[in-house]
Image (cartoon, rainbow, N blue to C red):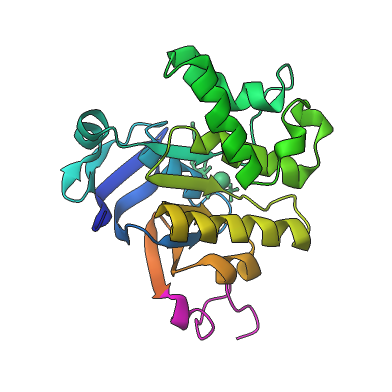
Amino acid sequence: MEGNISFININKSFSGKRVLDSFNHQFELNKVHVILGKSGMGKSVLLKSLMGLIEIDDGEILINNKNLRSIKEDDKFNISYVFQFSALLNSLSVIENITLYLDEKNIGSKEERLIKANKILKDLGLEDSSEKIPSDLSGGMRKRAAIARSLMIEPQILLYDEPTAELDQINTKIISDIILDLKNEKKITQLVVTHDVAFAKSIADTLSILDDGKITLTTNKEGIEGLDHPLVNPLK
Ligand SMILES: Nc1ncnc2c1ncn2[C@@H]1O[C@H](COP(=O)(O)OP(=O)(O)OP(=O)(O)O)[C@@H](O)[C@H]1O
Ligand SMILES: [Mg+2]
């Protein structure tokens, strides 16, 4: 699918405090877009507004010039979200967590759901962990299980909030490889909020800075090294 996700004049306030302020930006589909920004600048609010987890006050979100709401309903267009703390249920096994949403919606047969979940777990190197409970997994495995769960609805767009926050370099590399595979093999558009500049550089087709409710700076992959911004190159 060609085209863009367009945020047009988005405003969002909480108790009178403006978080997204005439926010305008376009993210090209089938690419990996990284968003950096100081704490409290509205990065999570931005992702949640695209996910539909929070209502924007005004403005429009369009995908290929079609309103997000109508495209989701008409075209079976799916957006998925990988939560910062993975948000897996420890009362269920990994595979039960992963099939839960489709189980509850009764989408497909039980067997189809299990086949699909096992395939995704295998792709993410978790085939031996399906019967474990999430709290028995390492942080990196939990993050992969959260990604596996988000893939069950076959999203065209996948959003990540700080996917490497508690991970060491080896697990961070595994997550960047997964993100690049999902782009190259499944053509999934991915928006990634992170504080980790090395990780950002390893995955980004574009990198944008969110500051004071707006994107104040954006660059493609080639421009990242030369970017004159303290969040990216603190010594510059
Ligand atoms: N549901 C909410 N109710 C009230 N205020 C909120 C809500 N969600 C976010 N905010 C406020 O909006 C602002 C932006 O929050 P957000 O979580 O998007 O920041 P962030 O850029 O993701 O920060 P961090 O890097 O610390 O995760 C903050 O001032 C926050 O307190
Ligand atoms: Mg946040």
Residue 96 to residue 171: above or below: above
Furthest residue to the left?
Answer: 65
Q: Quadrant of residue 121?
A: top right
**Magenta-drawn stretch contains 223:** yes
55 to the left or right of 40:
left
Residue 148 to residue 27: above or below: above
For image coordinates 45% across by 82% down, the residue present is 222
9 to the left or right of 83:
left
Q: Which residues are magenta?
A: 220-236
Q: Position of residue 196 (x, y in %)?
A: 64, 63
Foreground of the two, 64 or 223: 64
Q: Position of residue 231 (x, y in %)?
A: 58, 70
| Res. 218 in view | yes
132 to the left or right of 121:
right
Furthest residue to the right?
Answer: 136
**Magenta-drawn stretch contains 234:** yes
218 to the left or right of 170:
left
For image coordinates 25% across by 39% down, the residue present is 68
